[in-house]
Amino acid sequence: MSCENLPELLIEKLSLGQNLLEKLHNLSHINGVNKLKRKINQELNFLKKKKFNNTIRIENIQCTNLNHFVAVVDTLNRTPNCVEVDKTFGFNDRKLSVDIVSHNGFIWIKVIARNSKSLLQAVEGDTSYGTKSIVDHADDFLECAKLYPVCFQNPKVIFHFSQGITPELLNVLQTTEITVTTNENFVDIIEKLQLNKPINQEIYVNNFCNLATKKLNLDVSSMIAYVSNLTNGYCNYIYKEALLTQQAQWEAERPVKPILDKLFNGRQLLCCETALNDFKSIIETVGGETEKCRAKELIDRLCVLSSDVVETAIEKHDIKLGGKIKKRSLLVFEFGNQIQSVTVTANEGFVRSVKQQGVEYAVFIHESRALTEQKEKTATKRI
């Protein structure tokens, strides 16, 4: 890189940065993309200021972070189901930044644009004192991932080498649990990792056949939906209540019971005493006779456990109650967390609200369905 063609190199870098911003334009819906745009703009503004003041130096071109951002954006465009970019995780009283988080947190990707020969030299000790090697970074990522399990599984950590990797460095990293990718094998490896992707509300039930957990924690809303007349062949009504009529239309278009049956198949169904008692109370109050019979059949399938152990766990989260966050819901979801089970629920409002307070639960969210049998007496049958 010669100083003689510095103006040309500067124009090239500025064009490169602008191109990156254009590539990110259609990805603004992904969390963190706007933050990445700001970082790119900071680099561009720095170079533009140097150009304006005529103080640009060859080191400014050599050390710009734009090269790293190019690798991140290229990798981002090849990553399916991306949920976050430049995500920061707390780790041992400091912060660790993950370039790309995909598959609802199950896959972490660190993009490495540096020459792998220099990285190998650092591993071998040929570097300044105190500088971390790529193996040190690998250890940090793996330890940090253990603090943020998804559906009780540690995220899979990928180190993606956009400039390729030497066999020697690859051999070193293969002694760790890091998954190493290059541009040539990235897509194939991501597809293989998807076979173990966790359950979540954005993915349809057909993808849950390989779900590792064999336990499901049922929320009150799920038990109600399962036994409702609405989901058991009686959705051809127009009710006096607009909400019930809307749910009947949804059920005709998107039946909930087949989804839950497929989800429940081969898995142990659990609930806590609090959820069961509330479910029984609701059934006795507003349930019809057929719905009560279905409720009894469902209860006979359930393994009911005490929820006493959950109180202490709730306190450690320091979640503020109010709005969509009720004490009962918090107890039910934390119960599922304590027994390492996915919670099946229609209470999406709760899930989103606690997430805003920094708490995420392993959940399967389905559409809400109410008990309707008694309401059929005053409803009109849809022809």
Image (tube, rainbow, N blue to C red):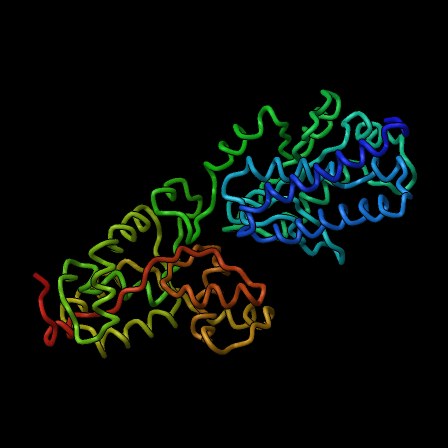
Relative horizontal placement of residue 282, taking residue 58 as reference (left or right): left
Residue 348 lies in quadrant? bottom left
In the displayed structure, 327 sits above or below 195; it is below
Across and down, in percent, residue 26 comes to 53, 46
Residue extending farthest to the top is 167
Across and down, in percent, residue 177 comes to 64, 35
Nearer to me, 264 or 14: 14
Q: How many marks?
A: 0
Nearer to me, 122 or 267: 122
Name the residue at 66% across, 35% down.
Answer: 159
In the displayed structure, 65 sits above or below 303; it is above
Nearer to me, 175 or 44: 44
Relative horizontal placement of residue 186, taking residue 269 as reference (left or right): right
Across and down, in percent, residue 261 comes to 27, 51
Name the residue at 18% across, 64% down.
Answer: 229
Quadrant for the N terminus in the image: top right
Across and down, in percent, residue 281 comes to 28, 77
In the displayed structure, 348 sits above or below 202; it is below
Quadrant for the C terminus in the image: bottom left
Name the residue at 43% across, 67% down.
Answer: 349
Relative horizontal placement of residue 103, taking residue 278 as reference (left or right): right
